[in-house]
Amino acid sequence: MGISHPLSIIILIIFLFYIPVACSATMESDLLAKATQGDAKAQNDLGVCYYNGDGVEQDYEKAVYWFTKAAEEGLVEAQNNLGLLYYGEGGWQDYEKAVYWLTKAAEQGHASAQNNLGFHYRNGYGVKKDEVKAVEWYTKAAKQDRASAQYNLGYCYYHGYGVEKDYEKAVEWYTKAAKQGDAHAQNNLGNHYYHGYGVGQDYVKAVEWYKKAAEQGHAWAQSNLGNCYYHGYGVEKNEGKAVEWYTKAAKQGNEVAQKGLDFLNRNVPEPQSTLSLSQPRPTSAPPQWRPEQQWSPAEQYELNQRLLHSRTMFPQDQAWDKRVFEARSGHAPWPGYPEPRNFW
């Protein structure tokens, strides 16, 4: 089932401690006066105005200038803003500077910076890749109830990145993030309930979490929910609902949903396995694992079908079932995700 899809574009959000800045020409003048006098908060707020182009002409160079002034004064929010801006926003990509400023903010206990610094260590952006350090920073942020860090930590426990693989721990952290409304975590948690990984298999709970994520526009959750309605897993079988959710996911480019919708629209039943539990297992080896980006649409659909019928086709092949789960879920290639970027 689809978890947070690996082809998703990585986006960043910064949650600051300040109330969002509503800029205007008058406010710009006032902030400029205070910023010029060395007021770090005003410097950061002025940087936000220039970054967003709110009440002033958007100007990333001026945003960087004022964020830097405030960051050098030790303002943790500005350090985090500057670190994330150097991730690549507005053409200001410099991973080493990003790590420098995120580290300063993270060491002051800024949860968003801790999560984002973990992301850099996890992927080796501007620093030597170190999954153990990534987990350390994710954990610090997760313990401050940062939902994205809880999601990332759950992801690390699922894969065993920087920690011993532990599905129960993955479920624990996904649950914390999911309860805060994180759509990625909600979808992943639904998938764990669907398959019974780290938690007792429960289709009803799977549907509950898929629905929460789907209603937030999460394409894989929409596809998964469509699948549940089509098969009657955890919910009364309803092809109309299946079409509705498959359509929402398909419009976002989800190829599995597109295939499912195609079958429903043509009223062609999905292929069923001709094997019974008493028949010998196939002798051919499963396809070799490759990142999903390298699959053709036909291969993606075949994996979907194998997943749906894996317990019938390969009742004893847990390795294959898990491989299909990882492939369909998006767990395998997904690098973790940092905070979405939305400067305040």
Image (tube, rainbow, N blue to C red):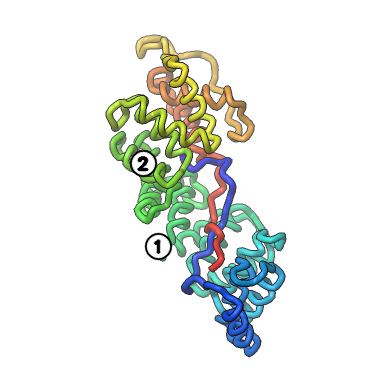
Is 95 or 159 nearer to us in this picture? 95
Give, as a three-letter code, the residue at label 2.
Lys
287 is higher (above) or lower (below) than 178: above
Left or right, residue 166 beside residue 293: left
Residue identified by numbered label 2? 211
Q: In this view of the protein, which residue sits in the foreground, 290 or 208?
A: 208
Tell me: residue 262, above or below residue 168: above
Q: Secondary structure at mark 1?
A: loop
Q: Element type at marker 2?
A: helix
**Residue 6: percent from the left, percent from the top?**
56, 41
Where does the image place residue 60, in percent across and percent down from the top left? 69, 67
Would you call the spot at circle 2 few (<14 residues within 10 Å), some (14-19), or many (20 or more)? many
Q: Which residue is mark 1?
A: 145
Q: Give the number of the disc on residue 20.
A: none
Residue at the far bottom in the pictured view: 37
Name the residue located 66 percent from the left edge and 60 percent from the top edge: 89
Snapshot quadrant of residue 126: bottom right
**Location of residue 132 in the rendering, given as x and y in whole percent from the top left corner:** 54, 56
